Image (spheres, grey):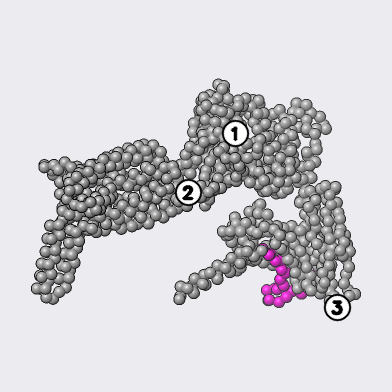
Amino acid sequence: MFYGWRSLLFVLLYLFSLQSVLTKVTVELLLRNYENKNSKKASGVGCDLFKLSCDVKFIICIKLGKLSACINKSSTKVFRQAKAINFDNENLVDKQFTRSFTEPYKGIISLFIEARDKDIFSDQLIDEYNSVLNIAISSESTQPIPYNVTQLGKYKSGSNLQYSVKVYCSQGYYGNDCTSYCDKTSELCNPDSCKEDIFGDDSFKGIYRFNETQVNMTNIIPCKYNEVANVTRKCTSMLGTGPYWMDPDFEACDTATTKKLNDLNKIPLCNDELGNSSCWFPDKIIQKANEIVDSSSLITTQQEVSLVSRIINEVVLNSTSAEKISSGMLNLVDKLLEVNSSILSEAQTITNSSRNILSSLDLLAVLMAGDPNTTDLDITKSNIALNGRIVSNSNTYITTFQNHEKQMQVVISNEEKSRGMLASILIPGSSFSNTNNSIYSIVYTNPNLFTTNNSLVIKKSSENSTKTGVAASIILSATVANQMMVNLKSPVLVKFKIINVNNLTGKYDCYFWNFTLDYWSNVGCRFVSKNNFTVTCECDHLTNFALIFDVSQDEKTTIQMIGNKASDRISLIGCAVSLVGLFLTALNLVLFKKLRQKLPMKILFCLSMSLMAMLIVFLSGVNRGSLSSIFSCHLVAGLLHYFVLTSFCWTAVEGLNLYINFVTIFKKYSPNKFMLFSSIFAWGFPLIIIIITASLGGYSDVDAKVCIIRHYYFYYGLLTPVAVILLVNFFTFCIVMKKINASNFKKSVHYKHTLYSSRIAFSCSTLLGLSWVFGIFALNKVARHFQILFVIFNSLQGFFIFVFYIARNPEIQSEWRLLLNKLIVRDKKNHKMGIKNKGYVSDTSKNASENFSNLTDLSVTSK
């Protein structure tokens, strides 16, 4: 009953939390009454709150639950310029307000404003404002706070969370300063117009003075930075509050940055060699463009993106000196890469801005090839970097990494630099047609210039339709001057460090940007390997490359994933059961000394210990995510490799022992010597393979998700010896079964003989590890069926060993009866009764020993 109520309570709490998550964001900005140190309201003669000369300061507080923080704002900054209220780069007082979000926050946030006068006198008018003004900020129409916000109020740029300030008077008050009061029932005092008001921001779209306007009329003013458009603001009224201004509509207006860039774009360009007073040189244009962009906090509209793109394109087309414009161009592109991806996508849709920028960078590389001053060039920025070098016709490595100043950097050399590598391209020397070659490489930190409709569109060569992917690396491009690097006989080798992908399911592949079709394609590229969070590919051409994570899943992939999950669960359950069976097997052989003296049981004990060690290592450390260091993963890979080999070696010893006992039956046969040589082989031979693999660095080349050896180390160090042992065990199994059937066929009826042979076959195959053969048949259409059989039989191998060689062994059953009888006799007071019970058990043990030859356990019947 208790658990039922607790479950019901959990469901109710979950539904309540879900309801709160789905609530729209409502941010309220309220005015609090100011109290002095004696907790008394301030009073006195005040100033006009809404005049520029007013010295009133506001204390603005933000509150989320029990957390809060406050900043100081002037009335002019808050109301006159209508700036968005945020807590970025402000001096917080009271409690530091921090809050981490794991998902987009959609709760209720409260903001409070308190009016204060900075002079030494108390102001009665301020008290009145505090009591009558209600200031509300609503973000219902905007996006909720994104999940990557770690400090509310100090949110990252680009979150698109903007608040509009609206001033409402309390009931009964009206007017811009809320100083007029009128009863609802009175019709004489209701005003019919909105008073003059100043609104806007000069650094954005301008400050505008709205003259007194009648209710339900709209005030129209030409935009400051483009007079062909207008800003509009309507005067409306509400019963009880009187007339008030609605928010201005600045949609058609340009920003100050747009105005400046537009003016710059109208200036004619002159050639670097010929110029006059009516035109500007390209380097001056690019310098002025950087000054305009740097003066604004961030490019905020698609018009600004399009203008910058047009300026870059015109500059590179009219320039003959790459040295003068290259740094300025990359600085502009660096700024554009910080722009919100939706704005870049909108600009690309309307004016092809992204394509123009990328084409301009390619033209810059061509220009650099003909400029002797740019043959050895290195430019680094936060989001983009460029490097140019002249190299010989030998293997050339292009490597990119992040330097100590957190800027991207590209290095072109004849030596591979793997430390800190984020991406690299190896160009074989045979791909070059000249002795000396000019190479230029550009790296981009994000794919914002390579998107279509704000999505990363990909198309595989084997598919007809496009799909959406996720960028899992930086973007690296390379250009060889005066040479078409396509259809290469020796492909270029491309490597990418995996980044930007968390908790996603899909497939990695290398793609290049198709300029003509505006999507990422993998034509001519081939996936090679994935190792230590690095993906390697081969491509027969040279262009812009990126590692893209395909998150789309077709029906076949989905079924395969479900099958893999089922196999994993079966494997874990089977391994746990098998581990228990092996432990019980070893426990029985340790408890009963009589059993340990026989050679088959000694071999069985060693096999059980080896399998037990293999399962323990597998369950505790094969998953790389559960390990704290790379060394731990390498150690687990080595231990797992060793115990897998020792387990198969002991199955080979078991097979040899069966062959000796049932086929050859040697007369001169020393069990002790056989066990000594078997131990040297089963424990020593795998150790030699482990030492060789470690010396060749095989354990440093492990899989990215699980700690197992890969590539040639797996084929030659594990698969080959296992396959040889399985082959030998298979022939041994056939010979032993033939011998057993030949000797027993005439002594039993057909049904019992078939049942008996089946038990023997299953017992032999369990000991010899022949269930691993199922893994060989896990191919093509029947792969899933054989994989399931492989997982079931191998994970339960220890359990089968316990059942067939311990639990069903009459001799072990007899030993347990004897042991239990001794324990019972010890507690009996009657000694004579104990002697009789002991004698009875001894007789039972004797009878069981006489029937020992009829057991199905081959290991026990072997002498």
Question: Which span of residues is magenta-colored?
Answer: 25-46
In the rendering, at what x and y percent does residue 53 appear? 81, 62
Please tell me in which quadrant of the rendered image residue 361 appears. Answer: top right
Q: Kindly tell me whether residue 126 is visible in this rendering.
A: no
Let me know if residue 38 is in the magenta part: yes
Q: Is residue 539 above or below residue 659?
A: above
Q: Are marks 2 and 3 in contact (CB under 8 Å)?
A: no
Q: Residue at x 79, y 45 (%)?
A: 259
Q: In the picture shown, does residue 252 fall above or below 689?
A: below
Residue 161 position, x and y percent, is: 68, 57
The residue that disc 1 covers is 543
Residue 201 vs residue 539, the one in the foreground: 539
Q: Which residue matches tag 2?
A: 560
Q: Which residue is rendered at x = 48% and y = 37% of the image?
A: 528
> Who comes first in sequence, dot 2 or dot 3?
3
Question: Distance of mark 2 from mark 3, alpha carbons?
Answer: 75 Å
C-alpha separation, residue under disc 3 versus residue under disc 1: 77 Å
**Mark 1 residue type:** Thr
- Magenta span: helix, strand or loop, mainly? loop
